[in-house]
Amino acid sequence: MDFLVNGQQLNYVNGDHRITLMDGHKWVGEISFPAVSAQRVVIERTFIRPEYQGRGLGSQLVARFVKQAEQQRLTVKLMCPFARLQFGLHPDYQELLLPKDRFEGRKSNGSN
């Protein structure tokens, strides 16, 4: 799912335990999720360059990650406050969390 920002098409690039967002050859941001086992990853951080912030790009990166994790049947641990916020806003994302890590029905303060 590529999309436009200010008339420019941004592209996702899947890498080794990260999804990067590019504006042509310019790095815009990424979500990183190192593996802790064959089927478990930790979302460490979501980052968007300041000049691209406020456009929903971080949310799009988390959504893209969730889709990929669902396809690969991964379980997820949240270390990134922004990702934790997104998982709180989208309770369906929490299916990727271990039952003990789910916080459905509770407000998330962004900390783990």
Image: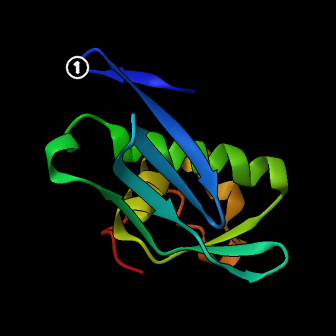
Image vertical order of residue 106 relative to residue 37, above or below: above
Residue carrying label 1:
6
Q: Could you say which quadrant of the image residue 37 lies in?
A: bottom right
Q: In the depicted view, which residue is nearer to us: 29 or 60?
A: 29
Which quadrant holds residue 63? Answer: top right
Q: Is residue 94 left or right of residue 72?
A: left
Q: Residue at x 64, y 67 (%)?
A: 17
Amino acid bearing label 1: Asn
Instruction: Give the residue at x 28% y 14%.
Output: 7
Which residue is at the front of the view, 81 or 27? 27
Q: Secondary structure at mark 1?
A: loop
Which one is in front, 65 or 110? 65
> Which image quarter is the N terminus in?
top right
Identify which residue is drawn at 49% across, 34% down: 11
Looking at the image, can residue 102 be seen?
yes
**Looking at the picture, how far across and down is residue 86, in whole percent?**
43, 52
- Name the residue at the top extreme: 7
Q: Is residue 106 visible?
A: no
Mark 1 residue crowding within 10 angstroms, few (<14) / some (14–19) / many (20+):
few
Which residue is pictured at 30% across the width and 69% down the height?
109
Q: Is residue 104 left or right of residue 49?
A: right
